[in-house]
Amino acid sequence: MKLLLCVSFLALSACSVSKNPLRKQVKLLQKGVIQEDTSYIYALPYEKGKTFRVIQVVSAGSPIRKSRA
């Protein structure tokens, strides 16, 4: 029983630890300590008034999908 409790505790504590290098910044954004700057407007190299279709592909790690992305 003690072993089960110990393993459960370790599994739960491992899930709560993030290896994200931006974790500190994310926490500060959530608390409202810092504000995200979303005012930058991108200047894309396309003719004004023309439209283009954009497709985003997510690779799942298989070599076949990587070659298609």
Image (cartoon, rainbow, N blue to C red):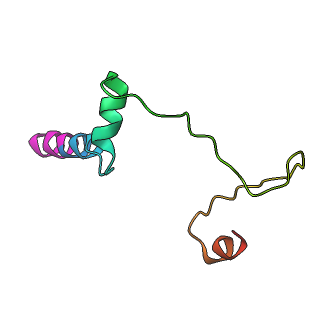
Above or below, 25 against 65 in this view is above
- Residue shown at 18% from the left, 40% from the top: 9
Q: Residue at x 40, y 28 (%)?
A: 35
Q: Nearer the viewer, residue 43 or 59?
A: 43
* Residue 8 point in image, percent of width and height: 22, 41
Query: Picture coordinates of residue 43 (x, y %)?
Result: 68, 49
Looking at the image, residue 32 lies above or below residue 23: above
Question: Quadrant location of the C terminus?
Answer: bottom right
Residue under the point 12% across and 46% down: 3
* Range shown magenta: 1-9
**In screen coordinates, is 58 left or right of 51?**
left
Considering depth in this image, is 59 or 41 the residue closer to the camera?
41
Is 49 magenta? The answer is no
Residue 66 in which image quadrant: bottom right
Who is closer to the viewer here, 46 or 28? 46
Q: Residue furthest top?
A: 32
Farthest residue toward the left? 2
Q: Quadrant of the N terminus?
A: top left
18 relative to 46, above or below: above
Left or right, 30 with respect to 68, comes to left
Q: Position of residue 45 (x, y in %)?
A: 75, 58
Secondary structure mainly formed by the magenta segment: helix
User: Where does residue 15 sit, x and y in percent of width and height?
Assistant: 29, 43
